[in-house]
Amino acid sequence: MAFADDVVLLATTLQGLQRRITSFAEYLEERGLRVNPAKSLTVALQPSGRDKKIKLVEDAVFTVNGDAITPAKTSTEWRCLGVFYANFGKKRPSMVKTLEDLLTKISTAPLRPQQRLVVLRYYLVPRLYHSLALSPLTSKFLKKLDCMVRAAVRRLERLEDSMVPACRQALRMSLVDARLHTARRLTFCQQNDLGTTKRRKAYWTKTLHDSVDGRHLRPTKNIPGAMRWSIEGTSLLSGKEYVNVMKLRFNALPCLSRTKRGRDVVKQCRAGCREDEVLGHVLQRCKRTNHARLRRHDVMVHYLARRLKEKYWNVREVPVFFTSLGRQIPDLVLKREGQAVIFDVQVVGQRVDLEDAHAAKRAKYINQDLHAQIADHPVIVMTATVSYRGCWAKSSVKDLQSLGIGKHDLSILTLRYLQGGLRAFRDHQMMTSVYPDEVATTETLNPPRSP
């Protein structure tokens, strides 16, 4: 990165940055402008694959019209639009030191006390607003700055330390006291104190998890990064898909049990199943969506296989083994450097605990006959156990991370199988097939109306 005044040039290589600087300098010279190398700075950042870090290249030299531009060192700091930066990114400014210097200048300047107060109130304090607004701050840090300003006012006005500040005296006024009391009451909701951001988040999280539609989202905490796309957005979804995927997460898709709840009408599945048409039945058990469920499962398996091959695992997809327990077909068999792993993917409903489902799937493949056919050393059994609403089993997350699957991959996996669930729901709504062996009588599905 190289910048001069308020112009920033970016490039992916050192040679590319030099070409951009030369091209930019020629562009300015054609218009009667010149780059001042003395006021310019270059920052050369290079990734280090071995250390998995970004290092600063201090010996990289860039020139403009034959003059060298000052390169950034590890101790170099600069400011842009009131924000301080270093080679590692945005840096909290030394606000305390800046404020101390400004207060010292005011107290030593040949000014009258009232002039000092005017400068402090209308020029010095507002000067800090921009940096404060664009910097990471805490209430403790702001309180420290506030105490420094108040102490300076005491010195300027020659006030004693025991003098009560005017703002504290104002708290004793009945009008101010009444407004503060009203403000405090507004921070309470159903006897819960919501005065801080942490408490507000905890309150709304608890409210969601205590609701009927939200109680099955509690395992989301097992991997919070997997749902970052719901906050930051993603280019993998159109606007309509995003809305519908969020409806699937919140159990708000228009099934009969939801659209007709509270009414004494038949809510059985339109495919002729002997179950109520709830979202769990549509996505997990209905015959209309069997092909979509298989496709959802295969998408997850193929994605994991591709990513694990990139991690230098030897991957076998859907191998068939004949054992003493019968035919067993795990989704993936992985081998690398003396390691052997049986990996299976499953999307489960809400009636079963995710950890119990994970343990049951592992128990299915803990078979010595099967392990002997895979490798002559111990074989590890792992699973990817998820619910159809986007929650992961904690043990499955640990298994995937041990294989080299990161949070970004888990986020994409979550998004993909939610899309698969949405596709299954759409197929269910558009199909008109009814299975004769499970069709109820016409009187059961359409009871006569009472006169």
Image (cartoon, rainbow, N blue to C red):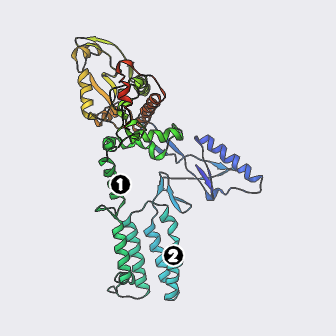
Q: Is residue 96 left or right of residue 37?
A: left
**Is there any visible trace of residue 305 in the rendered image?**
no
Query: Which residue is nearer to you in this view: 323 or 442?
Result: 442
- Against 90, residue 289 (above or below) is above
Image spot of residue 59 (x, y percent): 54, 47
Closer to viewer: mark 2 or mark 1: 1
Three-letter code for the amino acid on which mark 1 is drawn: Lys
Which residue is the site of mark 1?
A: 201
Q: Residues within 10 Å of mark 1 (few under 14, many from 20)?
A: few
Which disc is residue 124 wearing?
A: 2
Three-letter code for the amino acid on which mark 2 is drawn: Leu
- Against 17, residue 292 (above or below) is above
Q: Quadrant of residue 148?
A: bottom left
Secondary structure type for disc 2: helix
Q: Quadrant of the C terminus?
A: top left
Q: Residue at (53%, 71%) from the top-left corner? A: 127
